[in-house]
Amino acid sequence: MAFSLNNESISYNDQIILHSLSFNIKRGESVALLGKSGSGKSTLIKKLYESRKEESSYIPQELSLVENLSVYNNIYVAKLDEFSTIHNLINLVKPAKKDVDSVTSIIKQLELEDKLLQKVHDLSGGQKQRVAISRAIYEDKSILLADEPISALDEYLSSIVTRTLKKNFETIVCALHNVEVATKNFERVIGLKNSKIIIDKKCSDLNADDIQKLYYVCE
């Protein structure tokens, strides 16, 4: 089991954001958390991350990129702890071919290879999201916990990104607000509304009433 909550309430700044949550997420599942802004998706994603930090990559909604560094360096920082200080300092100025090749192989999957040495502040919102996703893949963990990581992407890129994530992570929990993207690209949806879970189903089991509920949680 990747995650298990049993009647748990989750707080943020001493205020209860989510009440009495109970669910299990098995290893190997791809789960979309649906809900409007303020529904508690971000709080839940962070809570799950804190419970499995050693195994998880985390993409916050603000992405946590360094705007004045290149795409390459923003991705490479995911493995700073694996190399010596000297190696890391050299890589800031003259990246090693092996490291460049590793990063390039990832961003190529996300159609971002032409931006390798470009500063992040020159990128669009969708390109920045793909940089953050590339960094998470480069970190090479088994679980991905991501907060609205594809909100700026069109349907075509959303499909490419989610397929790439499924190839690189065993388990995915992703906060979204788009019902169609969630049901088309993920195996399961959990809908949050008024601090509670309104719906929790496999996408293959959803009926017309369930879809209406999902649109309701995102309103």
Image (spheres, rainbow, N blue to C red):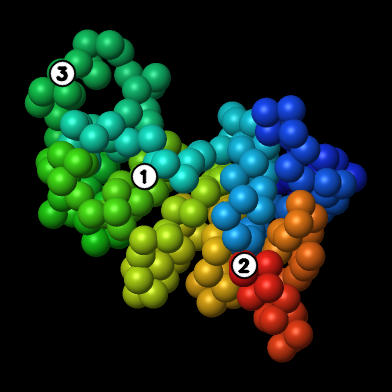
Count numbered badges in the picture.
3
Query: Counting other residues with Cα less than 10 Å from the Cα at mark 1, is it few (<14), some (14-19), or many (20 or more)?
Result: many
What amino acid type should be assigned to the residue bearing mark 3?
Ile
Q: Residue at x 53, y 69 (%)?
A: 178
Question: Looking at the image, which is closer to me, 144 or 14?
Answer: 14
What amino acid type should be assigned to the residue bearing mark 2?
Cys
Instruction: Farthest residue to the right: give it.
Output: 7
> Reading the chain from its start, which is encountered first: label 2 or label 1?
1
Query: Counting other residues with Cα less than 10 Å from the Cα at mark 2, is it few (<14), some (14-19), or many (20 or more)?
Result: some
Q: Are marks 1 and 3 in contact (CB under 8 Å)?
A: no
Residue 113 lies left or right of residue 14; in this view the side is left
User: Does residue 196 sit above or below 14 in this rendering?
Assistant: below
Residue 57: horizontal and vertical position, in percent?
Answer: 51, 39
Residue 145 lies left or right of residue 132; in this view the side is right
The image quarter containing residue 124 is: bottom left
Residue for badge 3 = 90
Residue for badge 1 = 132
What amino acid type should be assigned to the residue bearing mark 1?
Ala
Residue 156: in sight, yes or no? yes
Residue for badge 2 = 218
> Reading the chain from its start, which is encountered first: label 3 or label 2?
3
Residue 120: horizontal and vertical position, in percent?
Answer: 21, 41
